[in-house]
Image: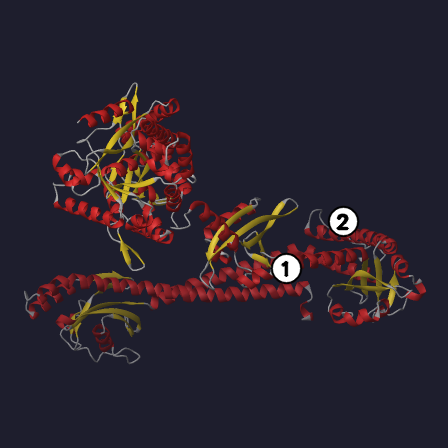
Amino acid sequence: MRRFDDTRTRLIFSVTALMVALAALFVFLYVAQLKNLEQQRRNEIRRIVQVASRSVAPILARYNQGMLPKEEALRQVTDLIRRMTYDDVFGPNYVFMSDYDGTMLVQPYERAKEGTNQAELRDSRGVFIIRALVERARAGGGYVSYEYPPPNSAEPQRKISYVAGIPELSCYIGTGMYVTDLEKDFRLFMGKVLLLSLVLLGGGLSLAARLLKPLFSSYAALTAAIDELRNHPEKVPDLPVVQYRPGSEAERLLSGFLSLYEDMRSATRRLREREEQLQVFFEEAVDGLVRADEHLGVLEVNAQILAWTGFSLEEMLGRPVEKLFPLDELRRKPLQREELQRGATVTNERKLLRRDGTSFWVEMRTKRLPDGTMQSIIRDISDRRNAEERLQQHRALMEALVRNLPVEFWVHDMEGRIILQNDLSLAKRGNLFGRRDEEANCDRGSGELWGEKLRQARAGAVVDFEVQAKDPRNETVRHYRNILAPIRQEGNVTSVMGFMLDITEERLRDEQIHRMAYYDALTDLPNRRLLLERLDEVLRRARNGETRGALLFLDVDDFRIVNDSLGHASGDLVLQDAARRFLAVSTERDLVARVGGDEFLVLREGEDSREEIESYARRLLGTFADPFADEGTSHFYSLTAGVVLFPDDGTDPGELLKKADMALHKAKAECRGDLVFYEESLNQDLLRRVDLERRLRDAVSQELLSLHYQPLFSAVSRRVVGFEALLRWNDPELGWISPGEFVPVAESSGLIFPLGEFALRRACRFARELRDVGEVHHMAVNLSTRQIQQEGFAWEVLRILEETELPPEALEVEITETALLTSYETSLENLRVLKSHGVRVALDDFGTGYSSLTYLRTLPLDTLKIDRSFIQNLHERKENELIVWAIIQLARELGLQIIAEGVETEEQVRFTTTSCDVIQGFWFSRPLPEGDIRPFLNSLRKD
């Protein structure tokens, strides 16, 4: 390629290449344009044939529809085609028509050929023209190229025809045009264009040579100056700048070279100055600098290296680099010669040897310079390495701490992916590295929960929350406490650490404590505390008109008998079974609670009507329709309920409980085994009860009550044998108040103790007074349930007998069956003490309670009193008479005295006098005040 180094030669070569390219372009354009013109002719003849086809289409349609015979259709088509003539560049032209056998049907300008068979017509190349046209027409139409003489010429020229078949008539139509004229005309045009182009090119080249002459001369001068500089670098080049027009390209080229030369001289000076500065830096640098040859022998070191190592400059120069490092250090970390030879920058940390044999840590950065030498920058990193070692120890301590944490621990980045996990977490959860925290912990709470808590932690908050999840190993529910805390660097949260502690045992203890605090241990039902909390919450909503409902107070009737007769274990079974039955007819919205003993409270929310609540309450009562089984024995019990509605009856918890209790007490008193809804009248009863308690308290303290005495008559002699002391109360404002009303008030308020003591002392004193006047009669005194159940009560009775000087055998204490249902042992002990001192014991109202034969067998009884209800209904029902006879026979067998109460008719007198020992009733006498007793006794003597 040396012959092309000259610029002028390159220019001539370039011009020649341009001319060849232009010639190729002309040829390409010629061929392309010629094809384009020919395609235009093809499109034109195709359009003409398509027009002719559309013209004959209506005729063919009528033929196809059977409206024309074939001969008539063919005639009409040939007439129509014969009229289709037009002019082209050669003059008149036409559309021809022939059948598929080659017979010419239409040829307007050569009519002699019509009707003749032209199948053997050939062109100058021997091509069968008509056959080719027929074949193309049968194939669906198209172009056929052949040579055929034009009009008024005997020389064949290339012609293109387009034909379209008419298969219905077994013929075709077509037209054609010559294309030889296109080639001649376009060839002439292109010759003129080429000639003009050559003329313009030659003129342009001549003008360019003239215009480029200054540029060529400047190139020559510049080349000579460069050669001179190569031989004499310090000599300033002498260039003929003034010979060229200012601002011309040649002038700018030479001036630019001179300016560049001056810049290079300035840069060289600055480079030398820089080299001197670098040398100073090399000597005074705080880092150590070592330059070695390609065989790693020391060529140069700075003062810092000498100061660090203690070697002299002479000892350093020529020293192999390997001897600058301890031998064991080289074995552990050899020099990386291959990397340096490849041009790589090698950075590593190693120990540098001192002259005294000690070493210290340095960071060494080495690179191969262009001249083949090795340059190393060495920095003392002893302090940093010591700090790193301390940091490593600290890190190891922290890793050990994290690894041995007794809780699961992990750290995740700001994208939520786990980047650290301790051993406990690995053991329990598996490898979670790289997983998103909400995905990794989805088995311990929902992904949405974790996502929300993580967002809070990333925002800088410390998040403490708990989740529950099933342990996949044994399907038990575990409780986990989680703490998420942000990790900050330079004040920004860069990651989040998490702690997870299994607090299942703690929660189980909490749950156990909660159950102990809020649930009944026997029935596992909610207790009073939980019910009150829930009731308070429900009533808050009820006050806002958001809900309605009812509170039902349930009580097992005479449940104390179960405990006393069957034992507390059987009683517990009844309560447990009752709880299950209540739950079976309740729903999730019902809260069934045991509030003590045999009492249950049911909070039902959401019912709107009284009828729905009553229906539910009766379902609860109906659960006691089936017997309760106890060791193969069935027992029937009844259930009584008091119902209060909210907000109708109030929205205060204490008020509702009080009203439910009032409704229950009314049901207990009037319709055991049924239910009672709270009504305002119950509140009036309560107010009266409170008023009675207040008045009774005053009456007891002022001894305003009195005793009346009903005589007891011998059934045989009809003489008085004793008296029964009966309490009476005549209030100054309310008048006479029945014992059936004020005695229960006294028992519930605790006034029964002072009231009972008053009655006993007054009765004993009056009996003593009667004895003092010769009326020796025993005195019967009724004892209340609470009195006989009081420990040491028997000794209190004996003390009163001693105070009143009444002989014990003159006193008879009357007890009822219900008094023995609770604290049976205490009651029995009191009766035995009294009996042992001579006091008589009578069982009152026998037959109305449980009539337990155990009492008759074990109690120290002297008398059995038949309840007045049997005596009064004696002749109304045969069963009552049978029962009374059975009681009498039983008492006779046990050696007990029999007293008939409530004798009020002659018929009752006849029955009781023949079967009982003592008779008592209005037939003989009403209860009399103290002042009427002696006159009454005197009147009996007179009679």
The front one of 254 and 935 is 935
From what the image shows, is residue 30 above or below residue 246? below
Q: Which of 333 and 297 is in front in this view?
A: 333
- Does label 1 or label 2 sit earlier along the sequence? 2
Which residue appears at 75% of the width and 53% of the height? Answer: 257
What distance separates the C-alpha of mark 1 from that of mark 2? 90 Å
Q: Where is the C terminus found, in terms of image quarters? A: top left
Q: In this view, does 785 lie above or below 702?
A: below
Name the kind of residue labelled 2 in the image. Answer: Val
| 523 relative to 337 in the view: left or right | left
Q: In which quarter of the image is residue 276?
A: bottom right
- Which residue is depicted at the point 57% across and 66% down? 17
Q: Mark 2: give few (<14), some (14-19) or many (20+) Cα within 10 Å.
A: few
Residue assigned mark 1: 404
Are the residues flagged by discs 1 and 2 in contact, CB closer than 8 Å? no
Q: Confirm whether residue 390 shows in the render.
A: yes
* 280 lies above or below 741: below
Between 408 and 726, which is closer to the camera in this rendering?
726
> At 26% across and 53% down in the image, what residue appears?
627
| Residue 384 image point, x, y percent | 78, 55
The percent position of residue 272, horizontal first and vertical second, equals 85, 54
Is residue 652 something that shows in the picture? no
Please identify, in this view, whether the residue under mark 1 or under mark 2 is nearer the observer.
Answer: 1
Q: Which amino acid does label 1 sit on?
A: Asn
Q: Give the mark count.
A: 2
Residue pointed to by mark 2: 242
Mark carried by residue 57: none
Could you say which quadrant of the image residue 176 lies in?
Answer: bottom left
Q: Could you say where residue 339 lies in the image, as x and y percent from the top left?
A: 73, 69
